[in-house]
Image (cartoon, rainbow, N blue to C red):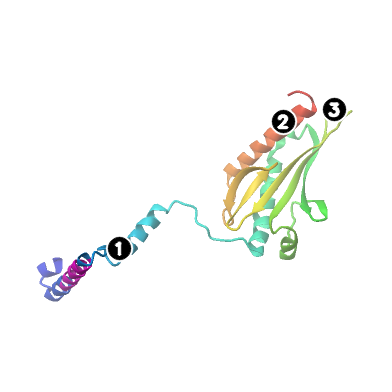
Amino acid sequence: MHDADAGNLDSFLIYTAKQLAWSLELSIKAGKNESIEEVEDWKKKTALLKKQLADKDTIKIIKSVEALTDLINSKIVPFLFAVMKDLKEFDDLFLGKRFRFYTTTGYRNLPIDVKFNSDQVSKFFQDNFLTKLTFDDFTKDPDNPFSLDLNLNSKFLKHKYELEINDSIVFTRLYHQEFTKVELEETMNVIGRFIISGLEQKLNLS
């Protein structure tokens, strides 16, 4: 209509023709008891749906050997050692703490600078990456210098992975997502509660 007001008669005629065609199409559909939604109404609904889902997490990577290799080397292992480093409250209660990882041949020490290759990941870690955090040699009981263990298991699903501590899920992440301070603190809190519970049981304090 604006074009007609501006003197652009051709544009106005094209617009009018399209509206008449649209109106005729709706009339024919109504006469046949068919849906009278606009032909491209689905595009508008799709755009609206995308807007409503804009804040939702988006899957960008699915499980593969390459994705798991990058995940373990660049995210999980550094995250585990960041957790262990920040658990300073127990340093004077144990002589040391360490991570080990599990393969079909048993547990092996996990170096902080480890880099697994794709062959190792394909052979040992397709379903999960199981590690054990050990607090070695309790320092306040010379007659019973016990150690405490916790299992930290990263379970790999098709579109996401889960971190479990002693079979309890702590959090779930998509493969492309980085760990945040929230996950770090949550993991430390869960481990802290398990260690305190283990100490109370060993020392008969509970």
Which mark, by number, is residue 141? 3
Q: Earlier in the sequence, mark 2 or mark 3?
A: 3
- At 14% from the left and 69% from the top, the residue drawn is 3
Q: Is residue 199 left or right of residue 75?
A: right
- At 10% from the left and 72% from the top, the residue drawn is 7
Along the line of sight, the residue nearer the viewer: 34 or 204: 34
Residue 89: x and y, percent? 71, 33
Question: Helix or strand or loop: what does disc 3 sit on?
Answer: loop
Judging by the rendered image, the residue that carries numbered circle 1 is 41
Circle nearer the viewer, 1 or 3: 1
Q: Residue furthest right?
A: 143
Identify the magenta region: 17-29
Separation (CA) of disc 2 from disc 1? 59 Å
Which mark, by number, is residue 197? 2
Q: Which residue lies furthest to the top in this view?
A: 205
Along the line of sight, the residue nearer the viewer: 108 or 139: 108
Residue 150: x and y, percent? 74, 41
